Image (cartoon, helix red, strand yellow):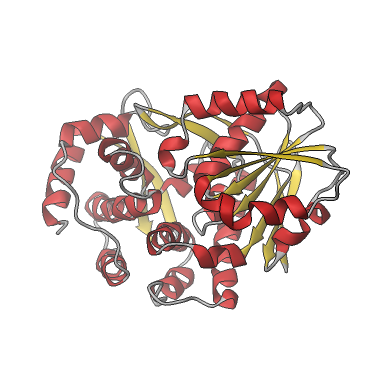
Amino acid sequence: MDTLTIQTSTNKYNVFVGTKLRFKTPSFLNRNYKNVLIITDTSVEALYLDDIISSFTPETNVSSAVVPAGESSKNASNYFDLISKAIEHGLDRHSLIIALGGGMVGDLAGFVAATYMRGIDFIQIPTTILAHDSSVGGKVAINHPEGKNLIGNFYPPQAVIYDVETLHSLSDEEIRSGYAEVIKHGLISEQQFFDQIKTTNIAEKINDEVLIEHLLKGIAVKANIVERDERESNIRMFLNLGHTLGHALESEIGYGKITHGEAVAIGMLFALKVSEKVYRVSLPYNELYTWLQNNNYPLQLPNLSIDALINRMKKDKKSRDLTVQMVLLKAVGQPKVEELEDRFLVEELKEFLRELV
């Protein structure tokens, strides 16, 4: 088992990465909780919920709440229902919420924990590769029909328990979704990490040792940035490489019709294309495109309105005064945030979508 420690302004928590960790969940907690609510989704429930419940002794009152799988569940209705479940199960300020699942569950359950009785403890037990990014850093949220994660908070967990055995049940699209964030961490950190990922064939089974190495490197990149800028006032925005267009695509196409990571992958291609134009540099656009293509990422999009995408991008949390801000790269490992004019973005998007075949 490997452990990383993340320091925030409000607490310090550990990220545990290894195998079979789900069977000893209480051993990773820094206190005993008498009342625990596990929030999961319909995909994860049958696979791992009983493992978590049985890891607790009978003295702990453990209950569960299940939401439909998929990004569309990260909405105000499910949020309110989960608050009602917490009340129904008698949770108080000394209770614990466990987010068991992927990024959607982590965001939703974390937002419930952040707002229930003005905030109670929660931990993350991620079951997707994508969640190596979303489970670390303390950002919790639900979606609004007008945009992704527009309703949220900064609220760090008490621990992250990452049992990589749970990743063996992932679908191909979920593996692709997760590895988009892994390669993003390579692009914003160092050439060596990027090179390591771009030679990885994720269409084949990845052994636990390699997977743990990639996850630890990705988490370390994020942790290093989050510790220096917890509330996204400056460098934390670098973690949003590919997300400005990616979130717009998710919203415009419809949550769940394209995975988060697959949308971000297209967004990263666009960010590299724009970066080359803005900085007059050569970036590994073709290398990234080839890796995505070889690993079966969906790179064709339905007909989309350029104006609608621009409007979505303006509603991104990084935008300022209705001006789009995007994370660009001057080189691999050298991200920078730039304000971009509408006219420039319209032309770049038109050209990019034409070429994206």
**What is the x, y in percent for residue 197?**
44, 71
Q: Is residue 256 left or right of residue 16?
A: left
Q: Is residue 116 left or right of residue 58?
A: left
Q: Residue at x 52, y 57 (%)?
A: 128
Up/down of 63 relative to 27, above or below: above
Up/down of 224 relative to 307, above or below: below
Q: Can residue 341 be seen here? A: no
Foreground pick, 16 / 195:
16
Q: Is residue 82 left or right of residue 69?
A: right
Q: Toward which corner of the image does residue 221 lie, by quadrant?
A: bottom right
**What is the x, y in percent for residue 169?**
51, 64
Quadrant of the snapshot with the N terminus: bottom right
Q: Residue at x 70, y 66 (%)?
A: 20
Q: Residue at x 54, y 61 (%)?
A: 218
Foreground pick, 76 / 187:
76
**What is the x, y in percent for residue 223?**
62, 52
Foreground pick, 243 / 189:
243
Numbered-mark total = 0
Q: Residue at x 55, y 76 (%)?
A: 210
Quadrant of the snapshot with the C terminus: bottom left
Q: Toward which corner of the image does residue 16 lie, by quadrant?
A: bottom right
**What is the x, y in percent for residue 143?**
44, 31
